[in-house]
Amino acid sequence: MRFATFNVNSIRARLNATTTWLDRREPDIVALQETKVVDADFPSEEFVRRGYGVAMAGQKTYNGVALLSRLPMRDIRVGLDGEGPDADRRYISATSGNIRYASVYVPNGKQVGHAAFVGKLEWLGRLSQTLRSELDAHKLPLIVGGDFNIAASELDVWSAEAMEGQIHFHPEEHRALRAVLGAEFVDAYRHNNPNTRQFSWWDYRGPSLRLNRGLRIDYVFLTSALVPSIRQAVIDADCRTGETPSDHVPVVVDVDC
């Protein structure tokens, strides 16, 4: 099974880039983030024509997550534990076959010390609780793909010195991410590429892409039972240089399951 995650930064603005990538990579299941569209305007027909079922949780202009699957989806869930109906659309999960999977879009946090930074940490706490609820409720292996807006280690930033204590690389964010992973989840890319410095996001502004000043903030985490089944885990960095690209690129993981 090929699982992928991709922050498209507006599915309508990046529809051609997304479908071109889908046609090339042919993933079985895709977690999308930052779709930036209400459900009624999601371009589902483009994915249905390619053999995908679509589940989405969108909102106008901001946020939005979706799942694409070549396999029938069931038990679709939107939102974290304790969230009300008006919460930002940042979490969706479903089951196909004997695998549970989720698309996650963690808040940016704006800057250290801002109220949004505190909100980011609180949101990560609810995500941790939700993932344990998913494991308890479904008793299935769980794959979580998404934009976590946190670079986990020095290998995941272009300069640890420049990023020290900054948003996306702050000790409090690292603690919150470790709590999300706990003992249950493994970073598929880092497991298969223990010493590789490769990024999944580059700022649109300035020379970040040309100088490779990026961050790895997009992940596929999977429960430890699936780790022996990982065949490959790659970052599709070529997608960043295409026509009207997202500022993120996909992460693709092949698992025997």
Image (cartoon, rainbow, N blue to C red):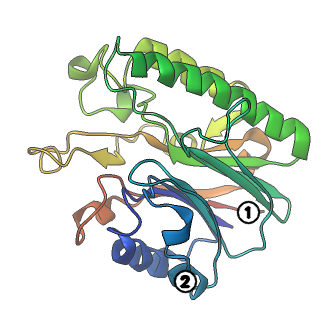
Give the crowd class for mark 1: few <14, some 14-19, many >=20 residues within 10 Å.
few
| Quarter of the picture holding the N terminus | bottom right
Residues under numbered marks 1 and 2 in contact, where contact means CB atoms less than 8 Å apart: no
Q: Percent position (x, y) of residue 11?
A: 41, 65
Q: Quadrant of residue 68?
A: bottom right
Q: Quadrant of residue 158?
A: top left
For the point 60% across and 83% down, which residue is it?
48
Disc with the residue nearer the chain's start (1 vs 2): 2
Q: Percent position (x, y) of residue 73?
A: 77, 67
For the point 57% across and 85% down, which residue is it?
50
Q: Percent position (x, y) of residue 58?
A: 54, 56
What label sits on residue 94 in the rendered view? Answer: none
Q: CA distance from mark 1 to mark 2?
A: 29 Å
What label sits on residue 256 in the rendered view? Answer: 1
- Left or right of 209? Residue 31 is right
| Quarter of the picture holding the C terminus | bottom right
Name above or below for residue 41 compared with residue 190.
Answer: below
Instruction: Find the residue positioned furthest to the left.
Output: 206
Name above or below for residue 126 compared with residue 68.
Answer: above
Instruction: Find the residue positioned furthest to the front.
Output: 86
Question: What amino acid type should be assigned to the residue bearing mark 2?
Answer: Glu
Q: Percent position (x, y) of residue 29?
A: 64, 66
Question: What amino acid type should be assigned to the residue bearing mark 1?
Answer: Asp
For the point 57% across and 26% down, which residue is it?
123
Query: Which residue is tagged 2?
Result: 45
For the point 26% across and 22% down, which residue is it?
163
- Left or right of 254? Residue 14 is left
What SS does tag 1 mark?
A: loop
Name above or below for residue 76 compared with residue 47.
Answer: above
Q: How many marks?
A: 2
Q: Quadrant of residue 91?
A: top right
Which residue is more in the foreground, 144 or 91?
A: 91
